């Protein structure tokens, strides 16, 4: 494949995100127009499907040689390869969308050789656009460079951090236990073996969580169970701000984009210490993605 024009692809993805945003804000999802996938907490709406159709049609027309992976058309067993691949979540935060809670985004990523390389995340309700190209920086609304504070403040320890976590839609078994016990430990007082973080947030969009870590509005985001389309775009934006993305299980500093276990830490002196401190608090080990 000839060299890809990353800037052109980035600009095209922004135009698609804006078109998708109009579809999303014009839609009136109701629980009767939505459906469930795996269980009653794993929602999909007609708008998710319609947006993915529009995105995949536009991308296949303009870039027929670039592979496509989308949340609503993924089948178990579809593997992400090292070929350039668009990785798309038409609505990240579907549960919020159904409830009309405005923490919703469209997430458009491009991975090359499995490395997230272009990321566009757009919240059409707040009209906030995050974008980045690997090696070329990340921006909010195209002009504000990220992170918002430069240099980012140094870390003390987890007790001064605002941490995002997600409950996800799997509500039983080992991984649910790892999450819920770790959440308790993150919040608990230090005398009781906890980290006593400033607060835990469970906001409902992995892509926007990653962007909030990139801007510096969150310090850490930890989740297992989400998918490449939830994180590919935000990953680029985060890394371009000096943020780290590592495994949610202790030990692996180089997770795969489709590894399904992630911890993001904003840029700032001491970020590796935060990773180690957090890993030391994880209660057990996630099985997803192993
Ligand atoms: C979900 C969101 C949520 C995360 C879930 C994802 P969806 O994506 O990103 O924050 O906890 O794991 O599935 O289903 O709204 O596209």
Image (spheres, rainbow, N blue to C red):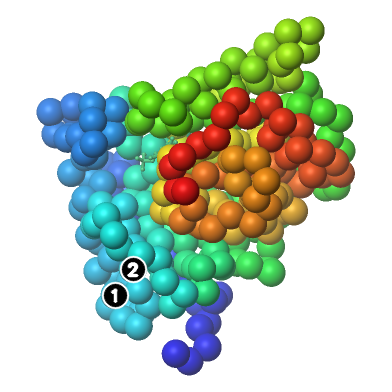
Q: Nearer the viewer, residue 62 or 250?
A: 250
**For marks 1 and 2 on the same chain, the one whose residue lies earlier in the sequence:** 1
Foreground pick, 230 / 94: 230
Q: SS at mark 2?
A: strand
**Residue 123 visible (yes or no):** no
Residue occupied by mark 1: 60
Q: Quadrant of residue 63?
A: bottom left
Q: Which mark is residue 218?
A: none
Residue 254 showing in the rendered view? yes
Residue placed at 51% from the left, 20% from the top? 180
- Residue, x 68% and y 68% (percent of image)? 136
Where is 3 relative to 195, above or below? below
Q: What mark, if any, has residue 68 been given in the picture?
A: 2
Q: Are marks 1 and 2 in contact (CB under 8 Å)?
A: yes
Q: Residue at x 78, y 12 (%)?
A: 190
Q: CA distance from mark 1 to mark 2?
A: 8 Å
Q: Position of residue 286 (x, y in %)?
A: 50, 37
If the picture is divided into quarters, which one holds ligand 1?
A: top left
Taking the image as shown, residue 56 lies to the left or right of residue 235, namely left
Q: Residue furthest left?
A: 32
């Amino acid at each position: 494949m000839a060299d890809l024009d990353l800037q052109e692809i980035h600009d095209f993805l922004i135009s698609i995100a804006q078109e998708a945003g109009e579809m999303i804000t014009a839609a009136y999802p109701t629980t009767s127009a939505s459906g469930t996938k795996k269980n009653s907490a794993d929602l999909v709406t007609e708008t998710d499907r319609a947006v993915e159709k529009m995105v995949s049609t536009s991308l296949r027309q303009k870039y027929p040689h670039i592979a496509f992976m989308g949340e609503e058309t993924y089948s178990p067993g579809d593997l992400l390869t090292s070929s350039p691949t668009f990785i798309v979540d038409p609505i990240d935060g579907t549960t919020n969308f159904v409830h009309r809670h405005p923490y919703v985004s469209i997430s458009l990523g491009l991975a090359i050789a499995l490395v997230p390389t272009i990321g566009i995340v757009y919240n059409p309700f707040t009209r906030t656009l995050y974008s980045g190209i690997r090696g070329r920086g990340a921006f909010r609304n195209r002009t504000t460079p990220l992170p918002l504070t430069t240099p980012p403040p140094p870390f003390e320890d987890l007790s001064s951090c605002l941490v995002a976590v997600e409950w996800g839609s799997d509500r039983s078994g080992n991984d649910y236990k790892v999450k819920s016990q770790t959440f308790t430990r993150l919040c608990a007082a230090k005398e009781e073996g906890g980290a006593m973080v400033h607060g835990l947030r469970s906001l409902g969009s992995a892509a926007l969580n990653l962007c909030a870590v990139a801007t510096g509005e969150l310090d850490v985001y930890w989740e297992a169970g989400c998918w490449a389309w939830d994180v590919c775009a935000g990953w680029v934006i985060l890394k371009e701000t000096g943020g780290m993305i590592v495994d949610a299980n202790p030990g692996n500093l180089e997770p795969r984009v489709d590894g399904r276990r992630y911890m993001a830490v904003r840029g700032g002196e001491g970020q590796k210490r935060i990773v180690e401190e957090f890993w030391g608090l994880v209660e057990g080990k996630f099985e997803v993605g192993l």
